[in-house]
Amino acid sequence: MRVMVTGGAGFIGSALVRHLVLDRGYEVLNVDALTYAGNLESLRAVEGQPGYRFFQANICDRAEMERAIAQFRPDRLMHLAAESHVDRSITGAADFIQTNVVGTFNLLEAARGYWSNLEPDRAVNFRFLHVSTDEVYGSLGDEGLFAEETPYDPSSPYSASKASSDHLAKAWQRTYGLPVVISNCSNNYGPYHFPEKLIPLTILNALAGEPLPVYGKGENVRDWLYVEDHARALDMIAERGRLGETYNVGGRNERRNIDVVRQICEVLDRISPSNRPRHELISFVTDRPGHDARYAIDATKLETELGWRARETFDTGIEKTVQWYLDNEWWWQPLRERYAGERLGLVGQSRT
Ligand SMILES: NC(=O)c1ccc[n+]([C@@H]2O[C@H](COP(=O)([O-])OP(=O)(O)OC[C@H]3O[C@@H](n4cnc5c(N)ncnc54)[C@H](O)[C@@H]3O)[C@@H](O)[C@H]2O)c1
C-alpha cells in the first residue's frame, strides 16, 4: 500500500504518518510545504524507516503535485494540508483561501489526471480522502449533534474555506467520478500539537506560571478527540469508506473550554505540583468574533458502518497529553521561543 499524505508534518498529519508507517507498515510519501505549523521533528519516529519519504512542496503548485503523484504512484491520497487556525484566519484570510481552496482544487485535478490514466485494476482501488472539520456545520444550540446531513453553515474564514474545499471534493466525485471520500472531525488534541491551540497553550503556560487565556466566559463547547483515534479513523475511512460519502468523526467528549482548562490545571497540580494552584492563572479575555457556541459530533455512521471506536475518553487522553508535554520539552521548547503567543483573531487586526 502506497499512501501519499499532504500536510504530514502537521499535528494530525504526523500522527497519521506515524500510524501508517509504524502500525500498518505502509509506504508513505509525506508532501508538506513546512509552513510555521509544519515540523519535521514530529516525524522523528519514522525518519529513516525504509517506507517513509518526505517531499517539501506546496499544494498550490500544480506541477509539483503532478510530479509527486507521477513519481510515487500512490494507491491512496490522504489530503490534510491546510491552514488550520481560526484566529489566524480572522487576522489574515488570504493564505486560507489559497491553500484550503485553491490548493485542494490543484490536488483534485492532479489526482484526477493520474487516476484517469491508471490501469483499471488500480484505478478501481484508488482513493482520495479529503480531511475536513466539523466547523463547516456552524454552531449548535444546547441540544443536538452534527450529522452527515447537517447543512453547511460556516462562521469563520477558516471554516468557510474548508467548506468550499469539501464542496469541491464532492463535486469532483459526482462530476468526474474521482473516488473521493470525505471526513469531518471534531477538535483534536494530543502530542505534537502546535502551542497556539487551546490545550497545548494551556499546558505550557500553566507549566511556566503564565496567564491562561480563556475567550469570553469559557462557555463554548467543543467535542474533543484524541489525535491517534482520529488517525485510525482516517485510515479506516480511506480503506473502507463508501465513495462519495461523508463520515463524521468524534469521540463523544463534549466539554466547555473553561472545564478543559480547569481539568488541565488539576492534572498538572497532581503530577507536577507547584506552590500555587494553576487555576489561579486563568484569565478571561475578549471573545473571538463569530465564536461558535457548541460543536458536537454524531459518529454513529463511522461506528456502525466501519466499526471504529474512540479508544481514549477525554479523561484518559488529557492525562496522556499532559504527561507527553512534561516528557518532551525538546519538541516544544524551540516552538515556544519562536512563537511569542501574540493574540490573533481580533477584528481590526489585518495581515492581508
Ligand atoms: N486540528 C483539529 O482539531 C482538526 C479537526 C478536524 C479537522 N482538521 C483538519 O485536519 C487537517 C490537519 O489539521 P492539523 O491540525 O494537523 O493542521 P496543522 O496546522 O497542524 O498542519 C497543517 C500542515 O499542512 C502544511 N501546509 C500548510 N499549507 C500548505 C501548503 N500550501 N502546501 C503544503 N503543505 C501545507 C503545514 O506545513 C502543516 O504541516 C486540516 O485539513 C484541518 O482542517 C483539524
Image (tube, grey):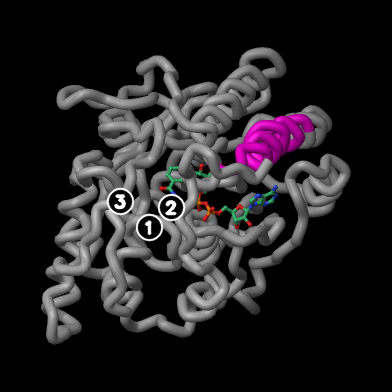
Amino acid type of the residue that numbered disc 3 sits on in the rendered structure: Val
Residue 97 in the magenta stretch? The answer is yes
Q: Position of residue 299 (x, y in %)?
A: 29, 33
Tell me how far mark 2 sits from mark 3, CA to CA: 33 Å
Q: Where are the magenta residues, as a range?
A: 91-109
Crowdedness near tag 3: few (<14), some (14–19) or many (≥20) residues, C-alpha within 10 Å: some
Judging by the rendered image, the residue that carries numbered circle 1 is: 228
Number of numbered tags placed on the structure image: 3
Magenta: main secondary structure equals helix
- Residue that appears at 34% across and 83% down: 327
First in sequence: mark 1 vs mark 3: 1
Element carrying mark 2: helix
Rendered view: 80 above or below 274: above
Q: Which residue is mark 3?
A: 285
In this figure, which residue is indicated by the disc labeled 2? Answer: 231
Residue for point 53% across, 55% down: 13
Regarding mark 1 in the picture, which secondary structure is present there?
helix
Confirm or deny contact between disc 1 and disc 2 (CB under 8 A). Answer: yes
Q: Give the spatial CA distance, label 1 vs label 2.
A: 5 Å
Q: CA distance from mark 1 to mark 3?
A: 31 Å
- Horizontal placement of 177 versus 311: left or right? right
Report crowding for label 2: few under 14, some 14 to 19, many 20 or more residues within 10 A (C-alpha). Answer: many
* Residue 117 as seen in the image, left or right of residue 339: right
The x, y position of residue 222, in whole percent, is 27, 42
The three-letter amino acid code for the residue at tag 1 is: Glu
Q: Residue 237's x, y, as percent?
A: 45, 38
Residue 240 visible? The answer is no
Q: Is mark 3 within 8 Å of ligand 1?
A: no
Residue 99 vertical placement versus 189 (above, below): above
